[in-house]
Image: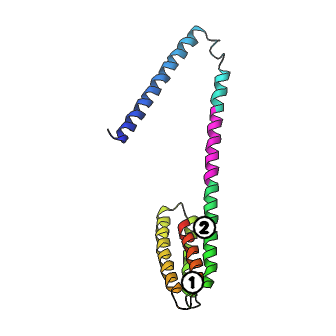
Amino acid sequence: MSFVLTDISFTLGLFIGMLLCFDLGRRFGVRRLSMDPDGVTKGSGPVEAAVFGLLGLLLAFTFSGAAGRFEERRFLIATEANDISTAYLRIDLLPAGAQPEIRELFRRYLETRIVVYRDAANEDLTTARLNETLTLQDQIWERSLVAVSQADALPSAAMLFLNSLNDMFDIT
């Protein structure tokens, strides 16, 4: 039997069981109320305290998880900004003739990444911008490989620049 059918049957059984227990509890409560109208509310304080305590615990876990996800996202955004900044600064290590084109590609790449973060609620625009980001990454990488393979390019500069590009692309 597939997992989907198992999950659906388990969920349906659990729901029906909860309805039956709810009805059974209501019937017991009605019978007890008819036998002792004043004694029904006695002893319900600890139950209420336990329910509210569990509700508070559930709420605390929810906020803790949300705060953790928020911090992780903020960390990733800051790391991406640092990686882009480092790679942009290392463009200066490339031969002078290749720098303007790569800088222009970086500018377009950064504008695209900003739009992705700014308009994340618009899924169609975000998907289009993410695809454009991948295209720009390919173009930057190709132009960078051409630039570092030129005769006047320093081998150590190529290693530093390509490593920072790799970090910049990996964070996305």
Residue 110 in sight in this render: no
User: Which mark, by number, is residue 14?
Assistant: none
Foreground residue among 123 and 14: 14
Which callout, 1 or 2, points to the residue nearer the camera?
Answer: 1
Note whether 85 is above or below 1 in the view shown: below
Estimate the x, y position of residue 132 in percent, counting from the top left.
48, 72
Circle nearer the N terminus (1, 2): 2
Q: Say which quarter of the image contains residue 34.
A: top right
Tag 2 secondary structure: helix
Left or right for 124, reference 78 = left
The structure residue drawn at horizontal position 62% and vertical position 15%, both measured from the top left corner, is: 40
Estimate the x, y position of residue 63 in percent, counting from the top left.
64, 45
User: Which mark, by number, is residue 155?
Assistant: 1
Residue 56 in sight in this render: yes
Foreground residue among 150 and 49: 150
Q: Which residue is mark 2?
A: 80
Estimate the x, y position of residue 160 in percent, counting from the top left.
60, 77
The structure residue drawn at horizontal position 63% and vertical position 54%, both measured from the top left corner, is: 70
Secondary structure mostly seen in the magenta stretch: helix
**Which range is magenta?**
54-69
Q: Say which quarter of the image contains residue 30.
A: top right
Tag 1 secondary structure: helix
